[in-house]
Structures are given as C-alpha cells and as structure tokens.
Image: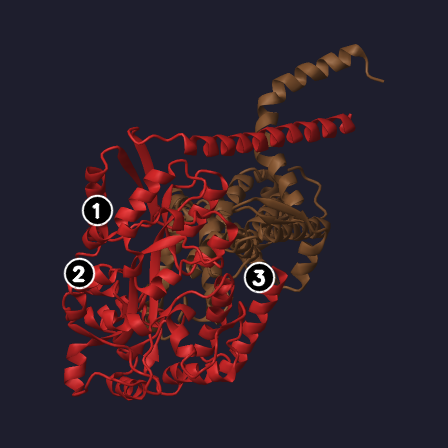
Amino acid sequence: MFSRKRWKEAGTAYTLLSPTLFVLLLFVIGPILFAIYLSFHKVQLLGTASFQFVGFDNFTRILDDTRAKIALWNTVKYVVIVVPTQTMLALVLAATLNAGLKGEKFFRIVYFLPTLTSSAVLTLIFMWMYNQNGLVNHVLEFLGLPTYNWLGDPSVALNAIMIMNIWSTAPFFMVIYLAALQDIPDSLYEAAELDGANAWHKFWYVTVPYLKPVTSFVVIMGLIGTFQLFDQSYIFSGGSGGPNNATLTVVLLIYQYAFKSLGTMGYAAALAFALAIVILLATWLQRKFSKEESLY
Amino acid sequence: MMNKKTWFAVGMSTMLFGSVLAGCGGEEKTAKNENKGETKEEQVEVTLAGWGGNPMEQKLLKQTLDEFEKKYPNIKVKHEVISDQYMDVIKTRLIGGEGPDVFYLDAFEAPAMIETGVLEPLDDYVTDDFDIDDFEKPLLDAFKGPDGKIYGFPKDYSTLALFYNKKMFAEAGLDVPKTWDELREAAKTLTKGTEVYGFGVAPELARLYYIAESKGGKVVTDNKASFADPKVVEALQPIVDMRLKDKSAAQPSEVGAGWGGEMFGQQKAAMVIEGNWAIPFLQETFPNTEFGTAEVPTIDGKKGTMAYTVAYVMNKDSQKKEAAWKLISFLTGKEGMKIWTSKGFALPTRKSVASELGYDKDELRAALVAGAPYATVWQNGTNLPIIMNNFNNQFVSAFLGEQPLDEALKKAQDIANKEIEAK
C-alpha cells in the first residue's frame, strides 16, 4: 500500500517533527494517558508505590460523593453566570472603544490592565477589599446599600469570586473583540445607514452577526476557563473550599484528593477525567447551538 | 495513515514511560547501597527541611545549627525553608525520591505518614545519653506508630490559653473568668455592638476538640467521625449560642482579621483562646494592646486545653542516616533544645529544659505550661484530616446560623464517614 518513497518522506517528516513530538508526548499526551491509567487504579504513591486495578470503582464513587456534587453544582453555577456576563461585557467594552472616542488608546490600556495582573495577586488584593471593614463595604455603605461578609458568608463567597473574575477576564476577551471589530468593513455600515439604520440597529444587525465566529471562540474559551476555576477559590478559602463548601470547585476538589489526602490520587484522576467530559459536552452543546463552522 | 500515527504515539509514550520508571528504580537501589558504606571522617551534608518562622525564630534555629556544626565539624547542615503548603511539598518530594534527610512533622499528620512507611523508626538509634524519659509523655506518644516504635522526637509544643485585654477588663471591672459560664457572662459585658466582641472564636476542630469532648462525647471513634453524638453537640452549643443569641462572639473574618491573634490585637475581641505563637506576635505587631494570659476556663469543673506539637523525623530513604540522627539527637537533645526554646517562641518538650528555663514562672507563659499535663494532643488516627475538613465546613455554617448545630454535625459526620469508607 505504501511505496518506498512515501515511507522515506514520512520518515524525514517525523525526524523533523521529533523535537516537537517528543515534548508533546512527554508533557501532554503521556500525562493524559497516565491520568487515564490512574483513574482505573487505587493509587498509593507515598512509601511503597502501589497501583491496584479497581475497574470503574473510582467513577462510581463520584456518584456517591456529596462533595463532588456540591463542587459540580458550584462550578456550573459559576459558569452559567460568568460566561454570558463576561462575554457581553467584553463586547460592550470593545464596541465603546471602537466608537472613535477621544482618548481611546488611554482607555484601551486602562481596560486591559486587570488582565495583566496575576490572578493570585489579584485575589489577595480583592480579599483585602472584600474585608468586612474593607473598601467594597465602605463604598456600599456610602451608597446606602447593604454590606456583606464577602469572605465568611457561604451565600455570598462564590459571588465575590464571580465579580472578581468577570472584572479580570472580560478585558482579555475585549481585546479579541476589538481586533475583530476593526475587521468589519465600513461599507457594511454605510449600506446599513443608507437603509435607514440607527446606531443600535447597526450594532445589532451588523456588528453582532459579523462577530459570531469570534463570540463562539470567546464563549468556548470562557467555558474552558471557568470550568477550570481553581486559584481564586483556593486562595479565597485557604485551600478548604469553605465557608461551608461554598467556594469548592471541581478542580479544587481534584487538588484536595490528589495532594491533600493520601492514597486518593486515582480518584482525583477519575474526577479530572469526568471534568474533561463535562467540558467536552458543554463545548459541544455550545457549538450545536451556534452552528458555527469556523476553525480553531 | 491515521493508524500508523496512533501506533507511533502509543509506542513512543510507552518507551518514554518505561525509561522514566526505570530511572526511578535505579536511583533507589544506589541509595540503599551507599547508606552502609558511610565512614565517619567523610564530609557529609544533611538536608533539613521545615517551614519558616518569624525572623527571631530563624535566627535561633541558625544559632542552634551553628552549634551543631561546631560540635560535628564533618557534618554540614543544608537548611531548606518551605514557606507554603509544607505537607504538599514534602509528600511530593518524598514520592519523587528527593525528600530531605530530616524534616518537621506536625503530630496531626503523623499517623498517616507513619502508616505509609516513609519514616525511619528511631528506636535503634537512641542511646541512654539521649534520655528519652525526659520528654513529656503525651507529646512523645504522638509520634509512636501502631507498632510501638518512635518515628520522631517532638521539638517543641504549645497549648492554648485564654488571652484577655487588660484595659477592657479593668474598664468593665471584671475578673478573669475561671469557668466557661463566667467567660460567657464576661463576653456579654465586654461586647460593644459590632465594634468589640467579647470573645473571638476560631470555628475549627483543631481549636474546639477539647470543648467538644468535655461532656463525655467522642469526636472520633475507631478512626471514624462520631461528633454528631448529642453529648458533643451539647458541649459545642454554647459557642454557637454566644454568637447567635448573646451576639458576644464572632470569628476573625467577620471583623476583617486573618486570625484570632490579629482580631485580639486590633482590639476587636476582648478575649481569645490562642497559643504561644500569639505572644511574640502581639508584642511586636500590637505593642499598645495590653494583655494577660490565664488557663482556659473550666467546663463542669474540669480543666481542658489543646496541645500542638511538631517533631523532627527522618526520611527512610535518606543516604546519610548516621549524620541525620546526630542532627535530630542534637536538636531535640538538652543542649540544642535549650538554645531553640531559649527565647520562648516555642516551649520545650523536655521537662529538664522547661524547669531550667523557668517558663512555668513566666508571667505570660505560665498558663500555657500549666496546661501541658491535662492537654489533649491534636491528633487522632489517620482519618483526622478528613474528619476535620468536614467538621469545619459544617460547623461554620451552624456558627453563622444557617442551620441548627445538631443537623450540621450530623451532615458533616455522614459525609466524613462516607469519604472514609470509600478510601
């Protein structure tokens, strides 16, 4: 079936690809396969390492794990609120920046700043502002609004993280939108104007449809990013997912099982695998709805 | 075409994994061989890992290690400070075969670590000179394995004591509470709205364990959670009532403090129950807060407090066990411990050192030392981390008034035991 020449060609290609392949196999494909292997075993790494095959036990255990359910529920709640909000905010910010106002470049920098800060530092700064006697509560009090125990009250802790995350990631997607906005040919707007469209019409009937592939990208990236929420809730709760499991996310739970408790590495791998499937499903659903055929 | 690629990928990764695993295996073997061939005159370097302390503590440890190197010129100590997530780092390093020779281990983590077999039993190294009976027995027992062997020697400890704000007490004309009922009454008097709370509570099992067991209930039974016992609920209910009914207690985060010591230092709590670590912190960070210490108030006439202790342990895979033991025996020996605890940042676990340094007569530390004989050591079997996690989660929600305490603890107990059974 394969001629000698094709074999040779393939050989040369693989030789040239080998550095990349090597890195990919070692750091991406290898670990993925190993994680799948782990998820079917009861693993004890400390001391005498032991791998005991347990079939689907790790997966059935998820169904019986109250904390896993809470973590999934928290994560889903987080995704459902954060992804649409940050996408819309990003679009609105980008549109205002693209409107040709004065000082546009200055605002572009100001809007983008939050994204540049590392999320760990950001979380610490926000925790300080969320403090019971902190900035946020002072502002709320000044405006005559109710104040909250942002860090300690289970019913608002996750919201506090949501607000912070929307604020810090929306600008990143804003930049992507901005690039796409500048791609929209002026002729489209001119044509719309001739048809008697006002600013709102132009935005809704020209800009938004034209940005559909970008929106699709932003939503998928947002989905993946939010499902993987870890560092913020980790720092917020000091690694416990508290108060009362309110900030427990799936990845935080995986971390706890993998590194905090001994001998549950296999179960952690199973949880990670389940999360991958959930993300896959969410992405697939999103693509089904938007019927987008663009490439990424 | 696709098939070929897939097979290639599978083959390649198998090869890679094979070589990685082979690499690990080889290292272990050489480690065991070298261990025997060590001679005394050779220069050896021992690694010692621990978490950081305040600058004064660092200096004291440095001083102790310098003394050690003077005494054993052929041994050099490489001190590594792991500043965050200490246990995660240590476990990962041990798994990777890169563990330090000697490291700190909290009593709370000890049973699980001993069970895995990564620690070296130290009985065979002990000589008469080392005087093992000099240690406070409950603290030493915390590092005994189920086989009766000793896996670590406690370097220091702290108990809990009642810290009270002298000025607030004088203004209110109150005496320092001796019983828990007096404490509750005092807390009511000392509370000023949401500005000052009478009592700062850390709603954690590590701090409440002795209270939880004060009415005869058990938090842990047969390595499983049993804290939904009505006797435990009854014992903990007053703490919840103080916050919800009396409005005289709060946790540090409610007033924007990180922990009890800070809350107390900022004068947002008139009383807290904290350990030895709070003394230097308060003196340095809040020199204007005048405070005193007293033994933890009694419950039903019985004294109780917690004890937290940390030991030096040896890595079983260490290649320099002789030198490592010399280090451990110096650090936990009379000489080393005396330097380490000389400034009172930590309390000595050896009775002889304690009486020599006279902390039982120290104004602030006497209450802490007095607690040692009746303290409950913060440790209970291999599943305590799981039990603690679930307790803390639900107790906070009861403490904040989201659900009744008995329901919260029942829920926490069920989840904890489910997790333990699935292990």
Q: Determine the chain carrying the residue at label 2.
A: B
From the image, tell me which residue sits under label 2.
Answer: B284
- Count every numbered label the image shows and give the total: 3
SS assignment at label 3: helix
Measured along the vertical axis of the image, is residue B352 above or below residue A104? Answer: below
Please indicate, yes or no, whether residue B374 appears anywhere in the rendered image.
Answer: yes
Amino acid tagged 3: Ala
Most extreme residue toward the front is B128
Residue A2 placement (x, y as % from top left): 82, 16
The 10 Å Cα crowd at callout 2, few under 14, some 14 to 19, many 20 or more, is: few
Most extreme residue toward the right is A1
Amino acid tagged 1: Thr
SS assignment at label 1: helix
B159 or B75: nearer the eye? B75
At horizontal 41% and vertical 66% (from top left) the residue drawn is A151
Report the disc number at residue B64.
1
At horizontal 71% and vertical 26% (from top left) the residue drawn is B8
